[in-house]
């Protein structure tokens, strides 16, 4: 029994970490956020070169044919840098959806381009997974879509979107199709989402869709968002420790005061105890275990809470500087906030966990 | 992540299951604070014979003599727990002193003490903390003065569980008054029947006396009954404390406790409604389940690191802090689900399970404090795990 990453996984994660440190310094994050870009071009270029978009595309379609655990390790590194690049939809959920539910021609048309990063595909799943707000929801009438979808991930500047309708079907809508309006709906400046409005837009259904596929996508998303929070959280902790060692007040580094030490210890303990849960949830997903949904829900809830705690505590360790724009901690704060609430926050995830065990 | 068992482990697991099926009915639980009775002694003999107790202790010292295999140990605990069968005797002598003796004892000490301790015939208590030396254990004041072939020991220990039932004590005594604080301590082993020892029960909030105070008045301890060299007691004690921490942070127990709490919520009702159907209680239950599962996964992560003899770093420093907090919150939730009835202790009318949850809750709070308080754990995590500045030394 080996409850650990493989040597290859460790190497991959280490090399991603180093490469992303060079490709995504704070300046790139800030540049993309301030200009409200869909992504940062140099960072996306670096990520493509590293093969990240190819992780979950099969080798037959030009990808690396790796696992959700591998994608979770990449997600952690992207979260660590708050990398302003497409990933959750383009490199995880869309490849999974196309592989499990797409027609052969849809797979051939999209998977190679997703793998190379030549195409960006958004996903509209919010209403299906965390519920409809403000009257949002998409109805499929024949091959046409009506209604709206909020918080479409990787939706800005996308070449196409995969859209879940209220009957649990999934449809592919191409950019430029008549009857589609795209509006910014930006919660996390490093991963801009959009609102899509459909007025009879032509769409191509994926033949294998239905509730089971959406639940599978939900589980994958939960694990990826949990992993992102793990990485983003650790960056906030490391920054806090560094700041506490440097910042002096009352004649000594503030990190020598027990209150500050304990804040850092609590952050580290709360986050790191939950790392193995993310690994295990990803492992169960990859094994198609009957327990996969339960563990994915718990990973989402636990990292949502731990991430939230780390985010606010880290800012507190930084004192007044913590809330400034200049320091840039807010990028990670908002990144973790979206990890926590996208597709359902901790309370919703716990409700799901209860339902899965006939406790609700 | 390869969670499949190797063939030899599958074979062991099958062997354990067969043993449990055939002999499980002979098991007897360890009663905290009590000497093992005849049934438990017999059970322990059977377990030692089959290698389910004392597995890695060398045969010449009464153990089974197997190579240390972290996964084998884990399997044994897991299978016994799953079957609801008591593991071997769980006492301080076996879990803490025996590993210390194996690492640091003389051959004569190993031959004299290990086998009877493993069999449960020789019961030990731990003399560490004092009223003035808790978190700052190294400041202990119990003195041992050389007089001929003996140390004459005077002082007092506290939090000594099992003192009244113990045959021997492993005790930290200051024997080098002129040495620096940490270098003046020796680790002495002596009989609890020595003249000059008196024991006073220490009643806790549970209403029972799980602990004792132990007073030493001119107690003579032969000088050779020392583990490690004079003045090296602190180093030896740290070895023991390492084993104590592992002992306290058992995820298998958390999984069991969670299952019991879930049962309480499913079975208890107020105004005809199940506690589990109260959204607020259910939410807390699901949060605790998530945290228990995380702790269990974390335990497996540490297990693999131990098997590979890799240093877990920060991951190894957070287990006790997180685990004890979860354990306390589990019993708190059970009490909350039972409402006022959850506060009834022992066998009172309307009490559920003889008030066991109220009992456990007090003890669980004690576990957050004992074995290194949560605040000490946080100091350790910050200083050793995050390399933050150590506590500044206050000038004496």
Image (spheres, coloured by chain):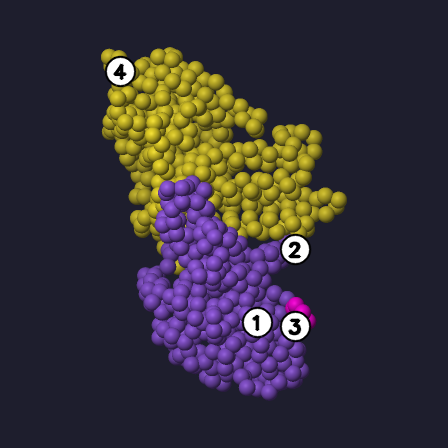
Chain colours: A purple, B yellow
Q: Which residue is mark 4?
A: B146
Q: Which residues are magenta?
A: A132-137
Residue A16, position as x, y percentages in the image: 35, 66
Disc 4 is placed on an element classified as: strand
Residue A136 got which mark?
3
Question: Position of A302 compared to A11: left or right?
Answer: right
Number of other residues with Cα within 10 Å of mark 4, as a class: few under 14, some 14 to 19, many 20 or more: some
| Mark 2 vs 1: CB contact within 8 A | no
Q: Chain of mark 2?
A: A
> Could you tell me how far apart the alpha carbons at marks 4 and 3 are, in whole angstroms?
84 Å
Number of other residues with Cα within 10 Å of mark 1, as a class: few under 14, some 14 to 19, many 20 or more: some
Residue A104, position as x, y percentages in the image: 49, 83
> Could you tell me how far apart the alpha carbons at marks 2 and 1 are, in whole angstroms?
33 Å
| Mark 3 vs 2: CB contact within 8 A | no
| Mark 4 vs 2: CB contact within 8 A | no
Residue A185 got which mark?
1
Say which residue appears at 46% left-offset and 46% top-offset: A263
Q: Which residue is mark 2?
A: A360
Q: Quadrant of residue A173?
A: bottom right
- Nearer to us in this view, B106 or A27: A27
């Amino acid at each position: 029994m080996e409850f650990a990453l493989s040597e290859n996984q460790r190497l991959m994660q280490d090399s991603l970490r180093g490469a992303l440190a060079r490709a995504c310094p704070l300046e790139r994050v800030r540049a993309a956020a301030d200009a409200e870009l869909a992504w940062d071009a140099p960072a996306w270029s670096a990520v493509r070169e590293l093969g990240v978009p190819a992780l979950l595309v099969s080798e037959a379609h030009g990808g690396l044919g790796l696992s959700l655990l591998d994608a979770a390790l990449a997600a952690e590194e992207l979260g660590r840098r708050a990398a302003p690049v497409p990933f959750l939809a383009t490199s995880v959920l869309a490849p999974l959806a196309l592989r499990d539910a797409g027609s052969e021609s849809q797979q051939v048309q999209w998977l190679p381009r997703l793998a190379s990063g030549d195409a960006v595909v958004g996903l509209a799943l919010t209403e299906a997974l965390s519920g409809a707000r403000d009257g949002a929801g998409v109805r499929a009438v024949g091959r046409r879509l009506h209604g709206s979808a909020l918080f479409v991930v990787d939706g800005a500047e996308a070449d196409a979107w995969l859209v879940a309708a209220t009957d649990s079907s999934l449809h592919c809508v191409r950019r430029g199709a008549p009857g589609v309006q795209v509006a910014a709906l930006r919660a996390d400046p490093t991963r801009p989402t959009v609102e899509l409005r459909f007025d009879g837009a032509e769409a191509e259904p994926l033949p294998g869709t239905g509730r089971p596929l959406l639940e599978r996508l939900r589980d994958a998303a939960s694990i990826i968002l949990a992993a992102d929070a793990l990485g983003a959280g650790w960056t906030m902790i490391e920054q806090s420790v560094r700041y506490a060692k440097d910042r002096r007040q009352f004649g000594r580094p503030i990190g020598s005061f027990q209150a500050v030490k304990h804040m850092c210890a609590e952050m580290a303990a709360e986050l790191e105890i939950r790392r193995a849960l993310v690994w295990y949830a990803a492992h169960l997903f990859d094994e198609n275990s009957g327990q996969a949904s339960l563990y994915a829900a718990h990973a989402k809830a636990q990292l949502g809470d731990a991430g939230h705690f780390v985010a606010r505590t880290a800012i507190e360790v930084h004192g007044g500087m913590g809330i400034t724009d200049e320091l840039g901690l807010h990028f990670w704060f908002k990144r973790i906030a979206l990890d926590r609430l996208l597709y359902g926050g901790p309370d919703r995830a716990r409700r799901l966990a209860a339902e899965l065990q006939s406790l609700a | 992540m390869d969670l499949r068992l190797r063939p030899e482990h599958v074979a062991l697991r099958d062997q354990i299951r067969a043993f449990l099926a055939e002999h499980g009915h002979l098991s007897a639980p360890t009663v905290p604070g009590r000497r093992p009775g005849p049934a438990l002694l017999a059970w322990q003999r059977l377990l030692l014979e089959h290698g389910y107790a004392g597995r890695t202790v060398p045969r010449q010292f009464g153990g089974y003599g197997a190579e240390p295999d972290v996964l084998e140990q884990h399997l044994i605990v897991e299978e016994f727990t799953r079957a609801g069968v008591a593991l071997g005797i769980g006492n301080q002598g076996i879990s803490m002193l025996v590993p210390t003796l194996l690492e640091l004892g003389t051959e004569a000490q190993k031959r004299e003490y290990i086998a009877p301790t493993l069999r449960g015939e020789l019961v030990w208590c731990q003399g560490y903390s004092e009223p003035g030396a808790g978190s700052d254990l190294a400041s202990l004041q119990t003195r041992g003065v050389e007089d001929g072939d003996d140390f004459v020991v005077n002082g007092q220990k506290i939090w000594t569980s099992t003192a009244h039932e113990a045959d021997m004590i492993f005790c930290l005594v200051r024997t080098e008054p002129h040495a620096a604080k940490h270098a003046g301590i020796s680790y002495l082993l002596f009989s609890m029947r020595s003249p000059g020892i008196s024991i006073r029960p220490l009643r806790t909030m549970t209403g029972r006396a799980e602990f004792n105070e132990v007073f030493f008045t001119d107690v003579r301890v032969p000088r050779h009954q020392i583990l490690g060299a004079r003045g090296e007691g602190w180093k030896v004690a740290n070895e023991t404390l390492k084993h104590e921490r592992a002992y306290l942070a058992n995820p298998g127990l958390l999984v069991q406790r969670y299952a019991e709490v879930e049962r309480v919520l499913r079975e208890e009702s107020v105004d005809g409604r199940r506690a589990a159907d109260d959204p607020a209680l259910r939410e807390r239950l699901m949060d605790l389940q998530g945290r228990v599962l995380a702790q269990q996964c974390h335990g497996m992560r540490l297990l693999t690191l131990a098997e590979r003899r890799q240093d877990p770093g920060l991951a190894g420093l957070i287990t006790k802090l997180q685990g004890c907090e979860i354990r306390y919150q589990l019993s708190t939730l059970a009490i909350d689900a039972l409402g006022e009835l959850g506060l009834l202790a022992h066998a009172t009318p309307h009490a559920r399970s003889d008030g066991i949850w109220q009992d456990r809750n007090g003890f669980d709070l004690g576990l957050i404090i004992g074995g290194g308080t949560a605040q000490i754990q946080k100091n350790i995590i910050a200083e050793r795990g995050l390399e933050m500045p150590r506590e500044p030394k206050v000038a004496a």
